[in-house]
Image (spheres, rainbow, N blue to C red):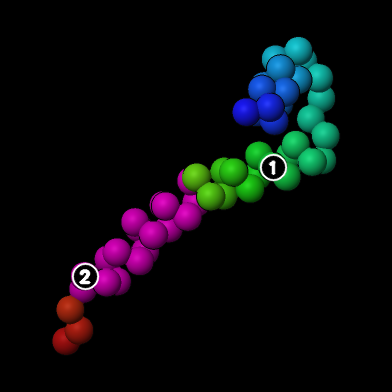
Amino acid sequence: TKFSGSLSRKLTLGQTLNLVTCIVIFFFLFLAVWIPCCVSDIVFPLLFTKEE
């Protein structure tokens, strides 16, 4: 895509990260890492435990 190509080009040229780029990276990491980890570590065990 046009955005990801320009982003990788900027980062490889050694330019500093601006606020928008940091927000995009944070949002992507939140969706890609934290949500699946929380679901697998917290929600699934709660779904499969039996109440006594």
Query: Can residue 11 be seen in the rendering of this structure?
Result: no
Which residue is most to the front?
Answer: 1
The prevailing secondary structure element of the residues shown in magenta is helix
Which corner quadrant holds the N terminus?
top right
Which residues make up the magenta segment?
A: 33-49
Residue of label 1: 24
The residues tagged by marks 1 and 2 sit, at their Cα atoms, a distance apart of 35 Å
Residue type beneath disc 1: Val
Label 1 vs label 2, nearer the camera: 1
Which residue is most to the bottom?
Answer: 52
Which corner quadrant holds the C terminus?
bottom left
Q: Is residue 13 highlighted in magenta? A: no
Residue 49 occupies quadrant: bottom left
Depth check: 21 or 45 in front?
21
Q: Is residue 49 above or below residue 34?
A: below
Tell me: 30 left or right of 43.
Answer: right
Q: Secondary structure at mark 2?
A: helix
- The structure residue drawn at horizontal position 59% and vertical position 43%, both measured from the top left corner, is 28
Residue 48 is tagged as 2
Query: Can residue 29 be seen in the rendering of this structure?
Result: yes
Measuring from the top left, give residue 13's x and y in whole percent: 76, 12
